[in-house]
Image: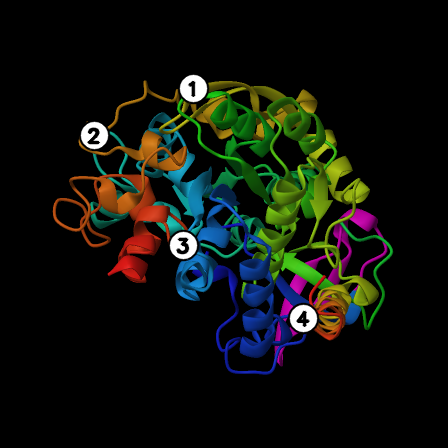
């Protein structure tokens, strides 16, 4: 999300970023893609950060007409269950509680209002860049209870795991987590298993795989016959990921390859995985727009469950409630493009969102809205 | 959300692996980063940082692979042109 980039970072020359935004290199990679493709293919980029880059740099306009990109469920803000957002709002209204969250969560509608409205009504809701900022807050104000809304995929889970392990180690009694961590491979499996799924190749999420590695994607790729390429986030990364995936499809191969090798190892990062394993156990979890997916979430285990805000404050996540006008489930599975939704741009805009994919900077609907209409724009 | 920003470690403090911290430069902007996930990281290493936590070190040799890939493709293209495209 935007708040994760330190202010001014776009201004300086950045190693390991600028070279992957080089226009000439991107055009050469796009030319290689055009020279490779002989028939129509549909690929899905799983991660919302990749969707955002594709729209920001108009990468679809560099691809052959017959290559179609559909946008996957990898936007954590979009798939955080409504009941958890309601629980966060309830917690934020309790006396003495400070609710800390990543900025993107504040405008995601719960079943009644959003966290921003709760703050306007007097709740103590604060935006932080990192759970460690929330820990600092808890240490500085011992008479208030600081709750961090721990949303995110495997990329964010080791961060909150380290935060809660540090809290336990320093006996910090006024810090807790409202956990809504979700695991990507079970959701990919669920999307590929849908009868309506048209996806023939996958770009797997580079930063999730930096933590977890990509062994979990190998049986999924084999089972569904879907070549998969672990892909980074800069324009040249994404074009190379697309090239590698299309090459497998054109050659009739199906394996998991790694484009983002400067960051991703096959086994991931053992130290980060160990942090997750020490703090969390795997549970069934609800995904907004997708329903309940087995073994797709995390919860605090063992003695660390005393840092679970739900049990500490007796808050129970409510039942899922969703605007029937929002077609998030069909967008998040790639069944439908954002601009095919009847509400897109009229009934649903970034200023007045009906559902989460229009709120998050990484939601497919917000990306279409911000950068023009994606594929449709290419054809105009 | 899963944004990771590359930065270079300028300074490391803390002996306990869980509490190891680094001062990391992002193109001149410094920030404190948790190094609990990169126990072997040293001053001078580049790391990918997400929400104040280093996810892993950047492999400098692997970072060049895409450019090598482009060079190979363009050489292959020239060879194919030179031999009539077969």
- Which residue is tagged 4? A16
- Which residue is drawn at the image coordinates 44% and 31% (left, top)? A198
**To which quarter of the image does residue A257 belong?**
top right
- Judge depth for marks 1 and 2 and give the one in front: 1
Subunit bearing disc 4 = A
Q: Can you see residue B22?
A: yes
Subunit bearing disc 2 = A
Q: Earlier in the sequence, mark 1 or mark 2?
A: 1
Q: Quadrant of the C terminus of chain A?
A: bottom left
* Residue extent of the magenta highlight: B13-36
Is the residue marked by circle 4 packed among few (<14), some (14-19), or many (20+) residues within 10 Å?
some
Q: Earlier in the sequence, mark 4 or mark 1?
A: 4
Asked whether disc 2 touches disc 3, contact meaning CB atoms under 8 Å apart, the reply is no
Colour basis: rainbow
Secondary structure of the residue carrying numbered label 4: loop
Percent coordinates x, y for residue B7 in the rendering: 68, 69
Q: Marks 4/3: CA distance?
A: 30 Å
- Which residue is tagged 3? A65
Residue that lies at the very extreme toward the left in this rendered image: A346
Percent coordinates x, y for residue B75 in the rendering: 76, 72
- Which residue is drawn at the image coordinates 62% and 46% (left, top)? A245
Any magenta on residue B20? yes
Residue A323, numbered circle: 2
Secondary structure of the residue carrying numbered label 3: loop
Q: Marks 2/3: CA distance?
A: 34 Å
Asked whether disc 4 touches disc 3, contact meaning CB atoms under 8 Å apart, the reply is no
Secondary structure of the residue carrying numbered label 1: loop
Vertical comparison of A248 with A293: above or below: below
- Which residue is tagged 1? A195
Secondary structure of the residue carrying numbered label 2: loop
Q: Can you see residue A169?
A: no
Percent coordinates x, y for residue A299 in the rendering: 58, 25
């Amino acid at each position: 999300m935007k708040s994760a980039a330190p202010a001014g970072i776009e201004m300086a020359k950045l190693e390991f970023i600028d070279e992957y935004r080089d226009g000439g290199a991107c055009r050469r990679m796009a030319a290689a893609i055009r020279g490779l493709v002989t028939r129509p293919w549909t690929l899905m980029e799983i991660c919302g950060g990749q969707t955002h880059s594709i729209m920001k740099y108009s990468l679809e306009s560099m691809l052959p007409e017959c290559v179609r990109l559909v946008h996957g469920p990898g936007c954590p803000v979009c798939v955080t269950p409504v009941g958890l957002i309601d629980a966060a709002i309830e917690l934020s209204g309790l006396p003495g509680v400070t609710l800390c969250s990543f900025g993107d969560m504040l405008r995601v509608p719960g079943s009644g209002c959003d966290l921003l409205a709760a703050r306007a009504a007097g709740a103590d809701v604060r935006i932080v860049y990192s759970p460690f900022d929330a820990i600092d807050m808890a240490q500085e104000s011992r008479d208030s209870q600081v709750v961090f809304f721990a949303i995110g995929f495997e990329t964010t889970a080791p961060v909150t795991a380290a935060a809660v392990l540090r809290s336990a180690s320093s006996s910090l009694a006024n810090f807790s987590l409202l956990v809504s961590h979700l695991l990507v491979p079970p959701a990919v499996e669920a999307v590929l298993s849908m009868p309506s799924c048209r996806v023939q190749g996958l770009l797997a999420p580079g930063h999730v795989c930096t933590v977890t590695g990509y062994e979990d994607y190998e049986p999924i790729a084999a089972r569904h016959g879907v070549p998969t390429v672990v892909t980074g986030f800069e324009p040249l990364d994404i074009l190379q990921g697309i090239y590698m995936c299309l090459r497998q499809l054109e050659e009739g191969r199906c394996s998991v390859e790694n484009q983002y090798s400067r960051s991703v190892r096959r086994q991931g990062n053992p130290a980060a995985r160990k942090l997750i394993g020490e703090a969390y156990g795997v549970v069934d979890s609800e995904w907004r727009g997708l329903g309940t997916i087995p073994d797709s979430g995390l919860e605090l285990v063992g003695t660390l469950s005393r840092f679970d805000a739900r049990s500490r404050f007796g808050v129970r996540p409510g039942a899922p409630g969703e605007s029937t006008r929002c077609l998030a489930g069909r967008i998040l599975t790639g069944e439908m493009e954002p601009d095919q939704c009847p509400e897109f741009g009229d009934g649903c805009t970034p200023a007045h969102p009906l559902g989460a994919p229009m709120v998050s900077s990484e939601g497919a609907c917000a990306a279409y809205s911000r950068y023009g209409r994606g594929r449709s724009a290419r054809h105009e | 959300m899963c944004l990771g920003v590359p930065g270079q470690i300028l300074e490391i403090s803390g002996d306990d692996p869980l509490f190891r911290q680094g001062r990391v430069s992002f193109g001149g902007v410094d920030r404190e980063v948790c190094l609990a996930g990169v126990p072997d990281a040293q001053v001078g290493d580049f790391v990918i940082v997400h929400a104040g936590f280093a996810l892993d070190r950047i492999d400098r040799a692997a970072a060049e692979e895409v450019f090598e890939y482009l060079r190979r493709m363009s050489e292959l293209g020239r060879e194919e042109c030179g031999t009539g495209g077969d």
